[in-house]
């Protein structure tokens, strides 16, 4: 393409100065990433470009169009060497002209790609991206929305499937009694919501991961070595049985939620004996999660606690219809009883996909999100359906085992719940998938849905 005129050169000078200022700021380290911008800028020997420059690039693009349509552009194009000398006659040192010309070429390449990959954030509603069609989508829907058997409750029974790509809603479908506006029971997805809520308190400096949990929940005095990190890893060492309805007579969680523990779930959990030293062994426990919820009450103070999920997390993300049940003591049932619409749950996924940042606010500290996504060292292969992080589930190999979901990227992580509830976050693919269900027989498979969803929704890698 022909060289650009001196007005565009002046704009490049301004962009470069702004870029230097942006790179020196804290926001540069936490602000948005654009792989194409980064790749082009590294290839050109220039720093990655910050979002503050987007408006300047838009102006530069308009100027390019105007200049290229002018008589001068046609004349200059016939003598490009003259143009280069003319364009860089404004520079204090003409020896820098080749570098500046390279920078101008970079801007021209970025004008379209940067706009195409600008960040999208939901307002009151999600903006919508391009509609998805084709045989890959049909194959996915055949799997996820098989004929529904409400009489026997057998087979795959998807209530909702929603997909966000690049911060935009590109697909959603509902079935059974569930609609877009239905706050759905998330079951153990509540645990990952609790982790995000604790992350806000952590960012306020109210606790540390190595703090003893008894500091915030005194009934744990009989287990003084349990730390906050141990509870987040489901590694309290308490002798807990998470057997659900398949073995109700020996199930700790059934007793906690429905019988002798339901009035004070944290106290019921704290009364359990120890089977291992805290922090040494993984054993999935809804009781550990409710100990965290009880600890949070003292971390933020009882006065704040009642509204804390809304004021600290839901409202900043624009979540309006969340419900979170409590036990008789007023402690949120952090293990099980949060209800969100699929669209609202996806906002939590976007927050996590973008390393705890919501627009210009670092709502969750980056080191907190890193902790959530780091495998627990005490996990042994095949102990559970995925690898535990800090109250999230990871698609990582651990203890010599293979990835839990072999057809999904290794950076995939998820919030998972009973009867097929799932939210999958794939940062590298810029995808968030929310799946609500009512599966009773184990037919639904995470890897199969992820494999089909990636075929339907993943974008080809840009050159």
Image (cartoon, rainbow, N blue to C red):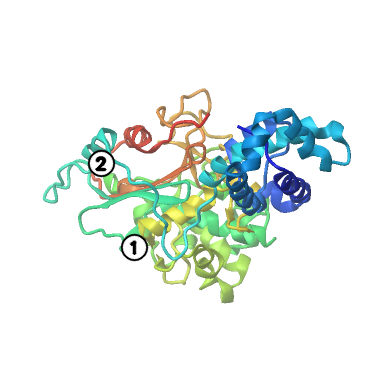
Residue 178 horizontal side relative to residue 210, left or right: left
Residue 242: image location, x then y, percent: 39, 46
Alpha carbon of mark 2 to alpha carbon of mark 1: how far? 20 Å
Residue 185 placed where, x, y %?
34, 58
Q: Secondary structure at mark 1?
A: loop
Q: Residue at x 85, y 34 (%)?
A: 94
Residue furthest out toward the right: 93
Badge 1 crowding class, 10 Å Cα cut-off, few under 14, some 14 to 19, many 20 or more, is some
**Is the N terminus in the top left, top right, bottom left or bottom right quadrant?**
top right
Residue 384, placed above or below residue 350: above
For label 2, the crowd category at 10 Å Cα-Cα, with few meaning under 14, some 14 to 19 and many 20 or more, is many
Q: Position of residue 414 (x, y in %)?
A: 45, 43
Q: Which mark is residue 144?
A: 2
Tell which of 97 and 319 is nearer to you: 97
Q: Nearer the viewer, residue 159 or 67?
A: 67
Residue 134, given in percent of the width and then of the height, sits at 27, 36
User: As rendered, which of 5 and 56 lies closer to the eye?
Assistant: 5
Q: Is residue 149 above or below residue 402?
A: below
The number of numbered discs placed on residues in the rendered structure image is 2
- Does residue 25 appear left or right of residue 317 in this picture? right
Please tell me in which quadrant of the rendered image residue 146 appears.
top left
- Which dot marks residue 183? 1
Q: Earlier in the sequence, mark 2 or mark 1?
A: 2
Q: Quadrant of residue 424?
A: top left
Looking at the image, the residue that sits furthest to the bottom is 303
- The residue that appears at 74% across and 44% down in the rendered structure is 6
Mark linked to residue 42: none
């Amino acid at each position: 393409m022909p060289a650009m005129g001196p007005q565009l050169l002046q704009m490049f000078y301004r962009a470069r100065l702004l870029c230097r200022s942006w790179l020196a700021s804290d926001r540069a380290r936490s602000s948005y990433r654009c792989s194409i911008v980064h790749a082009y800028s590294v290839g050109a020997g220039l720093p990655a470009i910050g979002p503050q420059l987007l408006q300047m690039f838009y102006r530069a693009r308009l100027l390019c169009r105007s200049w290229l349509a002018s008589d001068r552009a046609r004349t200059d194009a016939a003598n490009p060497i003259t143009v280069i000398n003319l364009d860089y006659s404004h520079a204090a040192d003409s020896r820098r002209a080749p570098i500046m010309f390279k920078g101008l070429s970079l801007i021209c390449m970025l004008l379209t790609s940067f706009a195409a990959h600008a960040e999208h954030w939901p307002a009151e509603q999600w903006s919508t991206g391009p509609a998805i069609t084709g045989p890959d989508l049909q194959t996915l829907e055949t799997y996820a929305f098989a004929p529904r058997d409400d009489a026997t409750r057998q087979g795959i029974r998807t209530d909702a499937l929603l997909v966000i790509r690049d911060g935009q809603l590109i697909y959603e479908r509902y079935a059974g009694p569930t609609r877009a506006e239905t706050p759905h029971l998330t079951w153990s997805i509540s645990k990952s919501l609790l982790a995000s809520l604790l992350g806000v308190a952590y960012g306020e400096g109210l606790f540390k991961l190595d703090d003893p949990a008894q500091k915030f929940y005194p009934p744990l005095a009989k287990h003084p070595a349990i730390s906050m990190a141990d509870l987040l890893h489901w590694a309290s060492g308490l002798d807990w049985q998470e057997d659900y309805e398949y073995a109700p007579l020996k199930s700790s969680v059934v007793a906690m939620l429905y019988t002798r523990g339901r009035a004070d779930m944290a106290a019921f959990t704290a009364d359990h004996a120890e089977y291992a030293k805290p922090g040494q062994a993984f054993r999935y426990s809804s009781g550990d999660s409710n100990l965290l919820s009880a600890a949070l009450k003292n971390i933020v103070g009882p006065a704040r606690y009642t509204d804390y999920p809304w004021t600290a997390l839901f409202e900043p993300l624009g979540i309006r219809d969340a419900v979170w049940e409590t036990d008789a003591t007023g402690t949120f049932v952090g293990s099980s009883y949060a209800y969100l619409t699929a669209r609202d749950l996806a906002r939590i996924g976007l927050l996590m996909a973008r390393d705890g940042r919501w627009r210009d606010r670092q709502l969750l500290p980056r080191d907190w999100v890193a902790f959530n996504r780091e495998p627990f060292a005490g996990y042994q292969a095949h102990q559970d359906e995925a690898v535990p992080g800090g109250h999230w589930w990871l698609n990582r190999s651990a203890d010599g085992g293979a990835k839990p979901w072999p057809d999904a990227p290794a950076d995939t992580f998820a919030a998972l719940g009973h009867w097929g509830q799932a939210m999958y976050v794939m940062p590298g693919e810029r995808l968030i998938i929310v799946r609500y269900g009512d599966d009773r027989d184990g037919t639904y498979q995470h890897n199969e849905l992820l494999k089909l969803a990636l075929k339907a929704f993943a974008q080809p890698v840009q050159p």
